[in-house]
Image (cartoon, grey):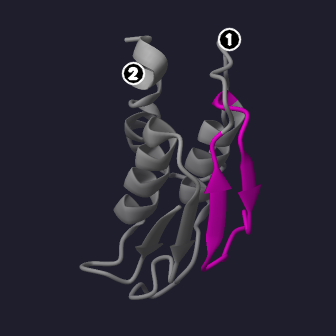
Amino acid sequence: MIYVDGAQKSGSGTIVRFAVGLATLLGEELHLTNIRAKREKPGLRPQHLKAVQALQQICQGSLGGGEIGSKEIRFRPGGEIKSGCYEWDIGTAGSTTLLAITLLPVPFIDGKA
């Protein structure tokens, strides 16, 4: 289990994106707390939630606390990467580049680079 306190350093969404990407790459469960605690609007914003949900979908994982405004999540990557065509709507002006960065580790899982 990987434990991450999201209030560390700047407490930004970068912690969310990198933590779920790392957990997926390592195949380890993630418990992320204090998500964006130092921000004016703490908790998951739509773009962060969509990034986590995208990884959950690709790796057939599970997500607890996956709601907008949630300050704590538990993410467990599944055992197999599901190939296919995916389409995600962030629903806001959130950055598609940051979504792509979150998904970047996926091809390296199980030597599928």
> Does residue 62 appear left or right of residue 52 in this picture?
right
Which residue: 43% across, 33% down?
100
Q: Position of residue 77 (x, y in %)?
A: 63, 42
Q: Is residue 19 visible?
A: yes
Q: Position of residue 42 (x, y in %)?
A: 52, 83
> Does residue 79 appear left or right of residue 103 in this picture?
right
> Does residue 55 appear left or right of residue 94 in this picture?
right
Q: Position of residue 66 (x, y in %)?
A: 72, 63
Q: Give the label, 2 or 1, closer to the camera.
A: 2
Residue 108 position (above or below residue 63): above
Q: Is residue 68 magenta?
A: yes
* Majority SS type along the magenta span: loop
Q: Is residue 76 magenta?
A: yes
Q: What is the number of the mark on residue 108? A: 2
Name the kind of residue labelled 1 in the image: Gly
Residue 29 position (above or below residue 95): below
Name the kind of residue labelled 2 in the image: Phe
Q: Label 1 neighbourhood size at 10 Å, few (<14), some (14-19), many (20+)? A: few
The residue carrying mark 1 is 84
- Name the residue nearer the viewer: 84 or 28: 28
Which residue: 51% across, 41% down?
24
**Secondary structure under badge 2?**
helix
Magenta range is 58-77
Label pair 2/1, CB-CB below 8 angstroms: no
Which residue: 60% across, 80% down?
71
